[in-house]
Amino acid sequence: MPELPEVETIRRRLQDGYGGKPGLVGRQIQRAELLWARTLAEPDPDEFHYRIQGQRILDFDRRAKYLSIRLSDDVLVLHLRMSGDLWVEAATDEIAPHHRLVLYLEGDMRLAFNDPRKFGRAWLLADPAGLFTGLGPEPLSEDFEPQRFYHSLQQRRRRLKPLLLDQHFIAGLGNIYTDEALHLAGLHPMTMANCLNYVQAERLWQSIRRVLQEGIRRNGASIDWVYRGGDFQNYFQVYQRVDQPCYRCGTAIVRTVVGQRGTHFCPQCQPVEPGD
DNA sequence: CACGAGACCTGTTCGC
DNA sequence: TGCGAACAGGTCTCGT
């Protein structure tokens, strides 16, 4: 589930509370339990357990798809990858099948990193800045500007779809929101980035922001068995809508593979650019 | 520099 | 019903 809007939704719910459960700000971590060693990227388990114990949660932050839990002395950074989720539960609840890392908090509560596919990672760092160097601009921030976006597109000889998925180019988009943004912008996923004119680049810039904001407003998208609680999936224009009519023109939505990722688009609304 | 393949993993769904 | 293949919200590394 985790693209920018889903991570942001999780961040807000951990910060402010959700579904009758209180927010976790201010709570002290009594101890940690690591159930799948590879989930912890850094430091080694011994140091991790020793260091995290007794620290207090100051707040929850997000950069791209990374969730940062700011603690008294360190920052616990989590990346949910394909199937990760965070569960707030009672300390006495049974440990669910796919819990990988569990924090026991004061007030008999637990914060659990649940991740069936085991791709997710956690880092406990004094300063997480190094993890984020190399990330592209944050699409909803002020300094993501259409002019600069146009210029960076001009410099790349890559197809739009894989380029938008590249976190070094722009950080936070994943497969769903990339397909949705390209449809809203009326651009074919195979279009070469450097052949967009300024108007098209600005339309794409706008579309990326609109789609992400809409995703956040709907609390993210819930597909499959992972992550419940968002309803952006009910507003998809192209993603997972193969052979169904485009809401704008009625043409059947097409699915192809671009850069090993399922890619959905409307062949009518998203024409191939001349010269491609 | 850009791209494709393979790796890391488990669970669900689809076709025969 | 059973079983294998394809597929899934992500990212890294390696070879061409």
Image (cartoon, coloured by chain):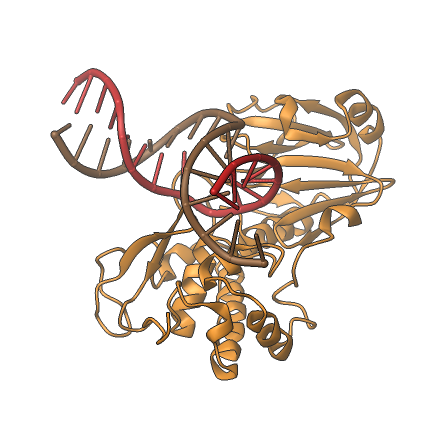
Chain colours: A orange, B brown, C red
Q: Is residue A17 above or below residue A195?
A: above
Q: Is residue A220 above or below residue A30?
A: below
The residue located at (48%, 72%) in the rendering is A207
**Viewed as shown, does residue A273 lie left or right of A90?**
left
**Image quadrant assignment for residue A39:** top right
The residue located at (75%, 22%) in the rendering is A45
Q: Is residue A232 something that shows in the picture?
A: yes
**Location of residue A246 in the rendering, given as x and y in whole percent from the top left corner:** 26, 67
Query: Which residue is farthest right?
Result: A73
**Viewed as shown, does residue A13 lie left or right of A77?**
left
Nearest the eye: A77 or A16: A77
**Viewed as shown, does residue A54 lie left or right of A261?**
right
Total labels drawn: 0
Nearest the eye: A156 or A253: A156
**Location of residue A24 in the rendering, given as x and y in whole percent from the top left corner:** 71, 43
Q: Is residue A192 above or below residue B10?
A: below
Nearest the eye: A243 or A57: A243
Q: Is residue A32 above or below residue A201?
A: above
**Viewed as shown, does residue A51 lie left or right of A24?**
right
**Location of residue C13 in the rendering, given as x and y in whole percent from the top left corner:** 61, 36
The residue located at (49%, 69%) in the rendering is A193
**Location of residue A213 in the rendering, given as x and y in whole percent from the top left corner:** 54, 66
Q: Is residue A221 something that shows in the picture?
A: no
Nearest the eye: A261 or A73: A261
**Which quadrant would the C terminus of chain A be assigned to in this image?**
bottom left
